[in-house]
Amino acid sequence: MPAGAAIIIDRVSKQYRRFAHTHRFLTLKSAIVGGNMFAALAPDQIFTALDDVSATVERGETFGVIGGNGAGKSTLLKIIAGTTKPTTGDAEVKGKISALIELGAGFHPEISGRENVFINGIMLGLTRAEITERFDDIVAFAELEEFIDAPVKNYSSGMYMRLGFSVAIHVDPDVLLIDEVLAVGDESYVHKCLDKIAEFKRRGKTILFVSHGLETVNRLCDRVMWLRDGQVQVIGDPPRVIGAYRSWVAHKEEESLAAGHQRRLEEAASDEAVEEQQPLVGEDAPTAAQGGRAPAEEAPTPDLGAEGADKQGAEAPYEPGRWGSRQVSIEEIRLLDAAGEQRYVFACGEPMTIEMRLSAAKPVEDFVFGVGIFNPNGVCCYGTNTDIEKFEAGSLTGEATVRVVIPELNLIEGTYYLDAAVHRRDSFTYDYQRGLCRFRTTSTVGDVGVARLQHTWEFDGSVVWQRTGGIAPAGE
Amino acid sequence: MWHSFRNLLRHRALIQSLVARELKARYRGSVFGFLWSFINPLLLLAVYTTVFMTIFTPPQGEGVDTQPYALFLFCGLLPWTWFSASLLDASNSLLVGGNLIKKLLFPAEVLPIVSVLANGVHFLLGLPIYFLFWFVFKTDAVSLHALWLPVVMLVQLVFTLGLALFLAALAVHFRDIRDILANVLTLWFFMTPIIYPLSFVAERAPWQITWVIGYLNPMSHILNGYHTAIFAGELIPWKRLPVTLAVALLLLFVGYFFFDRLRDSFPEEV
């Protein structure tokens, strides 16, 4: 063991075994009849949760573990805590360990908070005398002075979590394991917990921190490990590892958004094939007669006028689809970055170009191009069309490409749906593609709302900052 | 296994507080509260006494006095309740306490042990009731042979612990155990001299049954121990009881070994 190491994870692998239902029955039978219980308990399927993971955490270090769902973070923590044994390899911990994995896991609902504190404390390795000594601190930190003698079953989930956290933290361990436990509890309490964790850090205790809150990881941790599908992807400084993880997540989202776009286009196409069975819609026929999935939706694109949006909200929820007469059809919609590459994930503030490739079966003289960007709640974040912006149509013949160039996509982090349409000024629709194209924006800042308004902060001389923040310009 | 055993000794305080918690939590919220520990055996006694006073005649054994019958019956029912309730609780204990095994660094065997001990405390609480009734029904004093009681209890404790560990581990993998167990215990109840004295069987049952009840069933010897020590006020069966203890120790060893082998699978299965 190298000097100063607090946790040594040495080539740890963990396989979970799965048993089929019939297997169980056979096992019981063979256990009774043949007596070969151990042999019969062999698994049907093996799932590898951790694959050859090695890491060393130095004493006094705060070590973060990040990764997607199912990457093996919690399994690793359980192995370090000792509640689960690795299939191969070894995890060694030097010093007293306390795990904030499942807070209040040992609480018995029927007995009082006071009694539970004692039993939970004993479970976590304290003696009765030690608990008596720390009891007041535990209750004070949990802010439960009034309710400590009530049965735990009457506690709210926040109270439950606070008491669990308070007991676990007062064990005063050398090594503290924290697994995404700060999800419950109001904001002020979370801050209190984070302060307590920071205090641990100052006192030179070792902390292993598993979280999806990348900002918190970045702030607290000295080093970070990124687990991916049970394997160590990288271990290193928080900004570098978190950056690598973020871009991997973006890449993955990109792939799934691209796949989704393709699938929705196909679905819309097959929906239309069904609609075409209905009586054909002539050019001059009332558009409402189109039936199908777009009743009375022939408002000028996009549905962004206050009236239109209200009507929309009341009558039909935002549902992806495609309709229109197709005298002009949108062959393809692409989202392009500054370099002209097709992308689905953009950083907030990056340039984005919406490109529509159109083809007109016959020349038309009345046409409006429109786009609208909606968030998942169906709120129109922005929408415009050539008619609103006072373009007057001349003629459109054959193939055409329309680009909406947005130099700075100032939408806050989230998923967005794109509406794109070609229609006549009287709202008769040639082609309307609603929500078939989706994209995401990412942001390193947790600002809220719909769009990011350009801004800077200014202060006069009496305001002093330890560190200045602000939103970095796009593209960095 | 030896390591696990030493680890277990370190958790005495935990076992102690869990037994206390079990007892406290059991009757929390009920009107009579802790009194139920006394009321339960009383009611049970009332039921059996009524049945055997009015519907059946109490079974009589050759040369054994079972009068007053209520006292005889109570003498066997109390330890049997400890035994059967312990096994039922223990077979459930890992499943109920799954959270503890999964989420805390927690020696799993503590749970079945707590089940056995908590029911043992109930048994101990029933004893004063028994002696109270003794003075109501019988005029003579309790024999000094009643001092053998702790020995008999020790044998029963060891035997029950072994079985409890085995069943608890098995029930994690096969939930069916709990249902099977309930029925097996009913059969076992009648195959053990509780409502009848041991000598009763020898007279009328076929030899196989006599053999099972009279020799093979460890609970027979334990129950007979209670009967002789308390009810009859004689020396406990000093040959058979040590043999039973040896069997019980072997079972405890095997049960603990079995439990230890399956230990690692618990967090994934409960």
Image (spheres, rainbow, N blue to C red):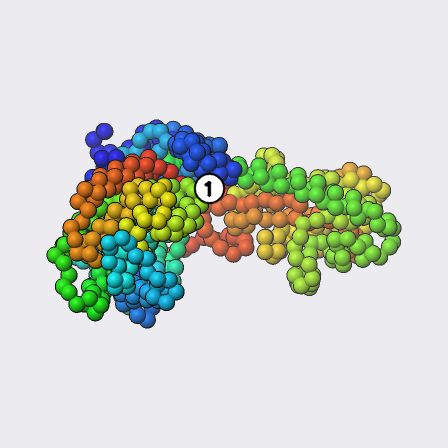
Q: What amino acid is found at the position of numbered circle 1 in the picture?
A: Asn
Residue B75 in view in this figure: yes
Residue at the limit of the structure toward the left, as seen here: B144
For the C terminus of chain B, give its image quadrant.
top left
Q: Residue at x 78, y 49 (%)?
A: A324
- Badge 1 sits on which subunit? A
Q: Callout 1: 10 Å neighbours few (<14), some, many (20+)?
A: few
Horizontal side of A409 relative to B269 (left or right) equals: right
| Residue toward you, A39 or B231 | B231
Residue B73 percent location from the top left of the image: 29, 59
> Residue B165 sits in which quadrant?
top left
> Residue A207 sits in which quadrant?
top left
Residue A371 in view in this figure: no
Q: Residue at x 80, y 41 (%)?
A: A360
Residue A464 percent location from the top left of the image: 31, 54
Relative height, residue A83 to residue A470 (above, below): above
| Residue toward you, B5 or B148 | B148
For the N terminus of chain B, give its image quadrant.
top left
Q: Residue at x 61, y 45 (%)?
A: A438
Judging by the rendered image, the residue that carries numbered circle 1 is A69
Residue B233 percent location from the top left of the image: 17, 56
Horizontal side of A53 relative to B1 (left or right) equals: right
> Residue B2 sits in which quadrant?
top left
